[in-house]
Image (cartoon, helix red, strand yellow):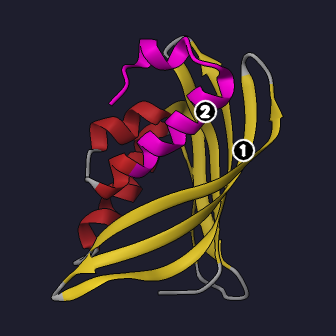
């Protein structure tokens, strides 16, 4: 993995993409210290399944986000793989960015071969903080429940 100092010296687009990739790796590998390192102190996250009453969050604050996502991750008997594609920057500057990406969520384990469980999109707002680029908000819309 890249170090924070390496990421801060990249083009803002690369740094922001790296931030989202680290979020995905952190969740998928149950690396809660890494997950904690990608959110700003006052960050927020939440999501919905389109066309349903299913949702989670909106959680505010780095520690609450980590606690809630850790509880979800530990409750899942399978393992997940978040595959991020088709990044589009809605805005980007030297210290702020808004990014929209597609998500393909795969599952494996419990005797099942890897398979696609849902798709959706993330909208992420990130900014440059003293510690480097951090997620200020990450919102998810899934296209189907799983």
Taking the spot 65% from the left edge, 20% from the top edge, the residue there is: 11
Q: Above or below — where is 71 with respect to 37?
A: below
Name the N-terminal-most of marks 2 and 1.
Answer: 2
Magenta region: which residues? Answer: 1-24
Classify mark 1: helix, strand or loop. strand
Residue in the foreground of this view, choosing between 135 and 108:
108
Image x and y of residue 44, in percent: 60, 46
Q: What element carries label 2?
A: helix
Structural crowding at the residue carrying mark 2, measured as other residues with C-alpha within 10 Å and reported as few (<14), some (14–19) or many (≥20): many
Q: Where is residue 27 in the image (x, y as percent from the top left)?
A: 36, 54
Q: Residue 50 carries which label?
A: none
Residue 141 part of the magenta-drawn span? no
Direction from residue 125 to residue 44 in the image, left or right:
left
Q: Magenta stretch: dominant SS?
A: helix
Residue 16, which numbered label? Answer: 2
Queried whether the magenta region covers residue 13, the answer comes back as yes
**Which is more toward the observer, 101 or 141?**
101
Q: Quadrant of residue 130?
A: top right
User: For residue 99, which numbered disc appears in the image?
Assistant: 1
Looking at this view, name the residue that lies furthest to the left. 111
Whole-percent x and y of residue 14? 60, 29
Give percent across and percent down for residue 88: 76, 48
When asked about the image quadrant of residue 8, the answer is top right
Camera-nearest residue between 50 and 9: 9
- Cα separation, mark 2 vs mark 1, equals 8 Å
């Amino acid at each position: 993995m890249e170090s924070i100092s390496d990421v801060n010296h990249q083009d803002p687009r690369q740094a922001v993409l790296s931030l989202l990739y680290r979020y995905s790796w952190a969740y998928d590998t149950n690396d809660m210290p890494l997950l904690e390192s990608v959110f700003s102190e006052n960050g927020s996250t939440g999501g919905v399944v389109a066309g349903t009453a299913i949702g989670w969050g909106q959680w505010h604050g780095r520690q609450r986000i980590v606690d809630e996502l850790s509880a979800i991750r530990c409750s899942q008997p399978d393992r997940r793989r978040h595959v991020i594609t088709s990044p589009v920057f809605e805005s980007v500057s030297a210290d702020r960015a808004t990014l929209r990406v597609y998500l393909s969520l795969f599952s494996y384990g419990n005797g099942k071969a890897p398979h696609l469980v849902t798709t959706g999109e993330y909208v992420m707002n990130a900014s440059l903080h003293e510690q480097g680029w951090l997620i200020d908000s990450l919102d998810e819309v899934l296209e189907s429940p799983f």
